[in-house]
Image: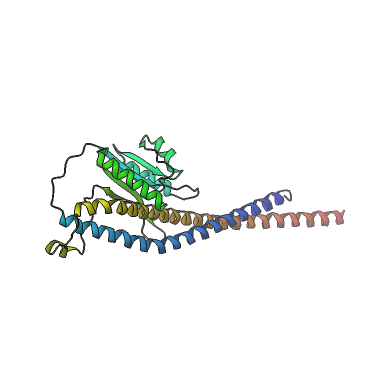
Amino acid sequence: MASSLPRIRARIRSIRSTGKLTRAMELIAGARCRRLERELRGEGEAVALYRKALVLLKEKIPEEEEREREGGRLILIAGPSLGLSGGYPSKALEALRKEGERAEAMAFGTRLPPRIREEGIMLLEAPPEWNPLDGEGAALLAEALLSWFEEGKYSSIDFLYGNPINSLIFNFKTARLLPLSDLGEEGLSWAKERPPLMDEDPKRLMRELLPSYLASLIHYLARLSSLAENISRRRAMEEANDNVEELLDELTLSYNKERQNAITQEITEVVSGSME
């Protein structure tokens, strides 16, 4: 029985080392979540201001019959580049599977593309410089998307993003990037009754503002997805820590039993030897 004690001790040391790692990763993910939450408040307000400006410009542009576009649909999706992100990749793939029928996908991060290819979904490779989490990368990506849309390569372009609901839960939602059919007009009813005066051509202003709006929106949605990813990672590490504690309790109990049995056996042998 005593021979099993070193094995149990080694197992306990190994699990304790794993627990230190998972606790550290939980703390890092939590810190990232708090930082992203603070920064995203300002970014969300900036996107809302861009959207309001575009709505005002649309009110000044005479309505034109929307020409029918023959291009396909492109879906952008932000995936993780780091491991141990819990259920985020699986949920992202499930959401893309529902949205991706007869669509082409462009995935960011290193973890999702191989799994998307396995699903048989057409995957468009994005150059490394089109990183939506980077301001310049988001601007380059926005220019390319706008060019493809205007050329008729795609009739619609969407962003499938991780949407944090609270500090523990997230889901996936789809945001329409192009065409500008769903800008929203909340709080802007006055613009219909008394549209603001403009000296510049509203069409030209909209064309100049649109790339900045798209870049801001893409960057915002990608960082929302990063927040959802870190929520998933923190939740996974929290569950791993709970499992570590349970395993340590079980192994400690087994170790104490084995140690007690070994002590009892030694006492029995000593007593038996003294009686001979």
Lateral position of residue 260 relative to residue 93, left or right: right
Residue 257 locus on image (x, y percent) = 67, 56
Q: In which quarter of the image is residue 146?
A: top left
Residue 161 locus on image (x, y percent) = 35, 50
Residue 184 at least partly seen: no
Closer-to-camera residue (61/164): 61
Question: For the point 12% across and 63% down, which residue is it?
Answer: 193
Lateral position of residue 53 relative to residue 4, left or right: left
Q: Quadrant of residue 152?
A: top left
Closer-to-camera residue (104/30): 104
Residue 128 at least partly seen: yes
**Eyeballing the image, is 154 above or below 261?**
above
Residue 194 locus on image (x, y percent) = 13, 64
Question: For the point 73% across and 48% down, which residue is it?
Answer: 3
Question: For the point 42% across and 60% down, which residue is it?
Answer: 36
Residue 68 locus on image (x, y percent) = 17, 40
Closer-to-camera residue (148/183): 148
What is the tally of numbered marks visible in this picture? 0
Which colour scheme appears in the figure?
A: rainbow
Question: For the point 40% across and 36% down, which residue is it?
Answer: 117
Which residue is at the far front? 199
